Image (cartoon, rainbow, N blue to C red):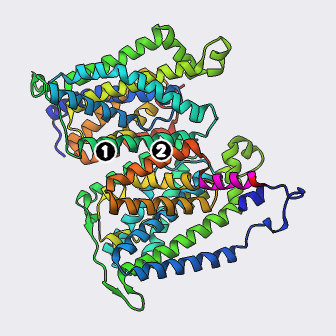
């Protein structure tokens, strides 16, 4: 929707007046209302599994939105999403073990570490374009995974248990508390993604995606823009991992750095529609819910099959994702 | 860490042996990804498919896994050609972005993996053959045939591909596509047809490599994931298009991993190997043998 407003020539005869992007405050308000509605729905189901399912979907809203910033706008595929997520998870574990700090301290720490990692990755791989960036991020995830396996303080390969309080005053069960935290993070990341899309950062990234050399020649500080984008992506993915150890109470490197996290994070924006802020949300909600359904009804192996099949079908049939499909239908109607 | 020359030499030898197998695993990636720019991240999944084909015929009919690998490579060649056709019409003909091709193969990777999982289950599978379990002793070095046979075959396969590329007409056409597809078109060649054949060869090598892999270690469906990073690392380290580079990089990877395993423990091996890759990408992105 908003993208159309940008691509429509400003003085074009067909440009309708109300096509201007909605103000961020209105979107924030709508998201909050949807968030509260979701909370009420999940509460009304009164079972723990509903929290788990909804939490997982929301977690992927954050991951997919973060992935989309770098890949959708900038064209840089981060294959190491699992690495950034995992570093968030393990930062959370370290904060828990070392400081025994309350949970709300954890999220900024995870964002900081994830952001620093993103900055470092960006700095190291700035000269790499396209597929090499993807390989470098994949290698980074393996390196981080290996480090965690060998770090006894956080449990090594055996994994680590996290004890959590059973109740939080005013909110209820701890699971519900973490769910609300994740809900807030999901809303925040959607708003961030939307703000990026409509800002100089998003437009700069799009220019880099179209032609990096031309963008540089046109005076776009591609270096700085890419660094900001990798840092932002890293921070968001790190934050997505922060509540995870508390939520599942046991983590090991194999879960925290699982390749299925990377494939989901890649598949969801692609299925929803890359390069639009709403695309990753649609993809995450659709694919995430479908997977939760499949886990309950069929088996958890079916999860990966669903991702694989949907990914291939969408890539071949609808390369622009659901958002692209909807746009195509709309344009045909005109 | 206890250092001893015995240990060091043994580690070195098994590293070279491991490198020979890595050669076979990575040669298909060098052909498909390095030369032809096809982001076939599903290559390890095809390798594991090869392993399961070897397992199936070995456990059913007691056929030698190596023989199965070479026989299965022929149908795999045609499957690879079909796959490239599908890929070509979906992406290259439409000038899709590289991300889409990557996602296509990522999807394929998981489809193959889950299919194997549903069919064969999650148990580790292995093959049986006369040479598994024997070893040759050369002074302080002991070489298990379980490692030596796949290594030799792996290196021979790689050398054959090298000869094929440099000596035959089609091989040279493949090299020409990797250098400049437009120029090949100008002199009357069809890059699509050449790429199709090359991709068929890449998949065929994956099946053979799978048969080699199941000789050295037991296999389960998701084990291919461990090799995604490795094979691409070898391809990049070797300078993308160079088969000689692939051999050297594979040996280097094998030796480094083996030394790390011996002196620090197996859990550290990926760190060193991928650390090397990251440093290479950061310092010299064109690899060791890159232009």
> Would residue A7 appear left or right of A239 to someone viewing this image?
right
Q: Which residue is mark 2?
A: A136
* Quarter of the view holding residue A279: bottom right
- Using the rendered image of the protein, determine whether residue A158 is visible from the camera's viewpoint: yes
Residue at x 48%, y 19% (from the top left corner): B197
- Using the rendered image of the protein, determine whether residue B99 is visible from the camera's viewpoint: no
> Would residue A100 appear left or right of A282 to someone viewing this image?
left
User: Residue A324: percent from the left, percent from the top?
Assistant: 65, 52
> Would residue A130 appear left or right of B27 to someone viewing this image?
right
> Would residue B53 appear left or right of B39 to someone viewing this image?
left
Q: Which residue is mark 1?
A: B222
Q: Who is closer to the viewer here, B140 or A178? A: A178
The part of the chain drawn in magenta is A322-332
Q: Who is closer to the viewer here, B89 or A143? A: B89
Magenta-colored stretch includes residue A79: no
Q: Who is closer to the viewer here, A72 or A87? A: A72
The residue tagged with tag 1: helix, strand or loop?
A: helix
Residue at x 46%, y 14% (from the top left corner): B165
Q: Residues within 10 Å of mark 2 (few under 14, many from 20)?
A: many
Q: Nearer the viewer, mark 2 or mark 1?
A: 1
Where B159 sits versus A240, above or below?
Answer: above
User: Residue B235: percent from the left, percent from the top?
Assistant: 43, 31
- Same chain for the residues under marks 2 and 1 in the image: no
Residue at x 42%, y 51% (from the top left corner): A306
| Total residue callouts | 2
* Quarter of the view holding residue B204: top left
User: Residue A91: percent from the left, percent from the top?
Assistant: 39, 66
The residue tagged with tag 2: helix, strand or loop?
A: helix
């Amino acid at each position: 929707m908003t993208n159309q407003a940008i691509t429509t020539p400003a003085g074009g005869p067909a440009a309708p007046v109300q096509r201007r992007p909605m103000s961020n405050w209105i979107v924030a308000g709508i998201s909050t209302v949807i968030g509260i509605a979701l909370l009420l729905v999940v509460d009304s189901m009164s079972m723990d599994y509903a929290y788990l399912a909804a939490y997982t979907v929301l977690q992927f809203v954050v991951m997919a939105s973060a992935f989309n910033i770098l890949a959708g706008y900038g064209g840089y595929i981060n294959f190491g999403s699992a690495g950034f997520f995992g570093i968030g998870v393990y930062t959370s574990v370290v904060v828990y073990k070392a400081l025994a700090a309350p949970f709300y301290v954890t999220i900024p720490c995870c964002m900081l570490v994830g952001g620093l990692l993103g900055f470092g990755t960006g700095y190291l791989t700035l000269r790499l374009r396209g597929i090499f960036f993807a390989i470098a991020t994949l290698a980074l995830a393996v390196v981080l995974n290996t480090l965690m396996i060998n770090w006894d303080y956080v449990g090594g390969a055996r994994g680590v248990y996290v004890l959590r309080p059973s109740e939080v005053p005013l909110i209820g069960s701890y699971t519900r508390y973490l769910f609300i935290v994740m809900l807030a993070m999901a809303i925040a990341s959607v708003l961030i993604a939307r703000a990026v899309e409509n800002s100089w950062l998003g437009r700069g990234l799009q220019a880099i995606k179209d032609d990096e050399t031309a963008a540089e020649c046109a005076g776009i500080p591609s270096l700085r823009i890419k660094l900001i984008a990798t840092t932002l992506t890293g921070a968001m993915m790190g934050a997505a991992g922060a509540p995870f150890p508390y939520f599942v109470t046991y983590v090991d490197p194999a879960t925290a750095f699982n390749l299925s996290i990377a494939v989901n994070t890649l598949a969801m924006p692609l299925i929803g529609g890359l390069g639009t802020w709403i695309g990753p949300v649609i993809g995450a909600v659709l694919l995430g819910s479908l997977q939760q359904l499949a886990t309950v009804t069929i088996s958890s192996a079916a999860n990966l099959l669903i991702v694989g099949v949907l990914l291939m079908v969408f890539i071949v049939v609808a390369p622009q994702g659901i958002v692209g499909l909807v746009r195509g239908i709309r344009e045909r109607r005109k | 860490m206890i250092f001893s020359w015995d240990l060091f030499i043994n580690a070195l030898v098994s590293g070279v042996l491991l490198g020979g197998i890595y050669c076979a695993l990575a040669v298909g990636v060098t052909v498909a990804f390095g030369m032809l720019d096809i982001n076939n991240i599903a290559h390890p999944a095809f390798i594991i498919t090869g392993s399961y084909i070897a397992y199936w015929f070995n456990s059913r009919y007691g056929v030698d896994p190596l023989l199965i690998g070479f026989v299965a490579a022929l149908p795999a060649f045609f499957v690879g050609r079909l796959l490239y056709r599908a890929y070509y019409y979906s992406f290259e003909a439409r000038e899709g972005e590289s991300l889409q091709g990557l996602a296509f193969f990522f999807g394929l990777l998981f489809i193959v993996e889950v299919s194997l999982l549903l069919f064969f289950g999650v148990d580790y599978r292995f093959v049986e053959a006369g040479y598994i379990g024997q070893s040759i002793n050369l002074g302080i070095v002991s070489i298990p045939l379980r490692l030596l046979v796949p290594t030799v075959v792996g290196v021979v396969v790689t050398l054959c591909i090298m000869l094929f590329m440099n000596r035959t007409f089609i091989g040279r056409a493949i090299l020409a596509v990797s250098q400049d597809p437009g120029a090949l078109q100008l002199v009357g060649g069809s890059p699509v047809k050449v790429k199709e054949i090359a991709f068929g060869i890449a998949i065929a090598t994956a099946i053979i490599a799978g048969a080699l892999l199941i000789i050295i270690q037991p296999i389960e469906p998701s084990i291919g994931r461990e090799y995604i990073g490795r094979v691409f690392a070898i391809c990049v380290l070797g300078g993308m298009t160079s088969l000689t580079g692939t051999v050297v990089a594979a040996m280097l990877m094998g030796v480094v991993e083996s030394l790390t395993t011996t002196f620090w423990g197996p859990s550290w091996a990926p760190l060193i190997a991928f650390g090397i890759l990251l440093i290479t990408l950061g310092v010299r992105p064109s690899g060791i043998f890159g232009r």
